[in-house]
Image (cartoon, rainbow, N blue to C red):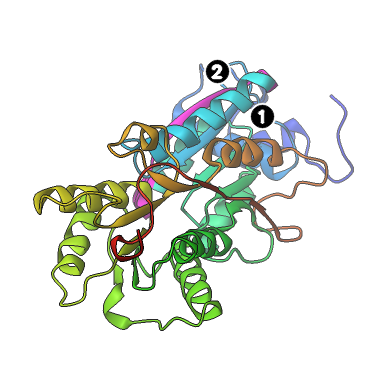
Amino acid sequence: MARETGRSTLSGIAAEAGVSVSAVSKVLNGRTDVAAGTRARIAALLRRDGYQVASRLGFGVVDLLIASLHSPWAEELLRGTVQAADEAGASVVVSTVDTPGGFTAWLNRATSRGTDGALLVLHLPDSSELQRLAAARIPLVVIDPPEEPGPGIRSVGTTNWQGCLTATRHLIELGHRRIAIIGGPEHLWSSRARLAGYRAALEAAGLPVAGELIRRDQFCAEGGRRQARELLALPQPPTGIVAGNDAQAFGVLQALGERELRAPEDLSVIGFDDVPVASWATPALTTIRQPLAAMAATAFRMLHAPGAGRAGTGEPHHIELATTLVIRESTGPPARVR
């Protein structure tokens, strides 16, 4: 086997690992008849020295790490990843990872069996995780990073600021002047960008940014319902609500139903994501389309694009895909201007 200058021989790696050359060769070629712990140790040394370790599964594998699969949002990301993998003749291994311990457990498994790369959803690796990924020679791309990525981390997101500005402007153009927002958790980069877009639209229209109309909650239907109840109970309730995502918008519609109110006759509601069920709601949901499947497919292709870096190395590279306004039935002029 040809070797790059300075790369250890298989016998050198065997000596360092305290195993036979045969064991090293088995791991290099994806054989499974080596103990898991030994296999992980040998694979790490091989990758450190520039060898491409075959997957134990015998075919191309990319890992998708996501906190939960129980949402239409997650399903769209999974769909985009699988479609891109099919085009490349690869397979996707999906792991639910939402804690540092879970990430460590996944990395141990991935190092042992081999992987062509990792797609991390809403998870920005810390310095120690980056070092371990780099040592294992596992390239990564972050999808929808929770914070602005640092040097050497490749990522894919969407135009959150522009999307929420467009959503708010849509309500302003319909004649709304008292517009509320239900944002997502403050620690998320996307949440902060969407709130900034909302503020920018109001300020550009010469409208006040009222503190009582700015709410935050989790990106779920219960969060939207909880905040909508409080907004509807205000002495001067809003005539329109920009929700942080479609799930929150569904919660707003539920809160309206509890009061025997309707959208858009009593309140205009606009979401963010355009998950498939948005068009099935009653009324069908006006929303900002976030190209979730395309984001995942783009991230997959970035893993091995020309010049793609490894974890913790190279130049920062962040791609944002455009959002678009999808007008359906949940928005209209406020009652007083019909």
How many other residues sit within 10 Å of disc 2, few (<14), some (14-19) or many (≥20)? some
Residue range of the region highlighted in magenta in the rendering: 88-102
Q: Nearer the viewer, residue 258 or 290?
A: 258
Taking the image as shown, residue 81 lies to the left or right of residue 176, namely right
Give amino acid for label 2. Answer: Leu
Taking the image as shown, residue 275 lies to the left or right of residue 247, namely right
Asked which secondary structure carries label 2, the reply is loop
How far is mark 1 from mark 2, CA to CA? 11 Å
In the rendered image, residue 330, in percent from the top left (x then y), is placed at 35, 47
In the rendered image, residue 205, in percent from the top left (x then y), is placed at 52, 77
Q: Quadrant of residue 87?
A: top right
Q: Name the quadrant of the C terminus.
A: bottom left
Residue drawn at (34%, 52%) of the image: 99
Numbered disc in front, either 1 or 2:
2
142 shown above or below 216 = above
- Mark 1–mark 2 CB contact (< 8 Å): no
Residue drawn at (17%, 66%) of the image: 232
Asked which secondary structure carries label 1, the reply is loop
Q: Nearer the viewer, residue 169 or 118?
A: 169
Task: Determine if the magenta segment contains residue 223.
Answer: no
In the rendered image, residue 56, in percent from the top left (x then y), is placed at 56, 20
User: Which residue is identified by label 2?
Assistant: 57
Give amino acid for label 1. Answer: Val
Q: Which residue is the extreme one toward the front? A: 338
How many other residues sit within 10 Å of disc 1, few (<14), some (14-19) or many (≥20)? many
Q: Nearer the viewer, residue 39 or 181?
A: 181
Q: Name the quadrant of the N terminus.
A: top right
In the rendered image, residue 230, in percent from the top left (x then y), is placed at 16, 68
User: Which residue is identified by label 1?
Assistant: 53
Q: Quadrant of residue 11?
A: top right
Task: Determine if the magenta segment contains residue 94.
Answer: yes
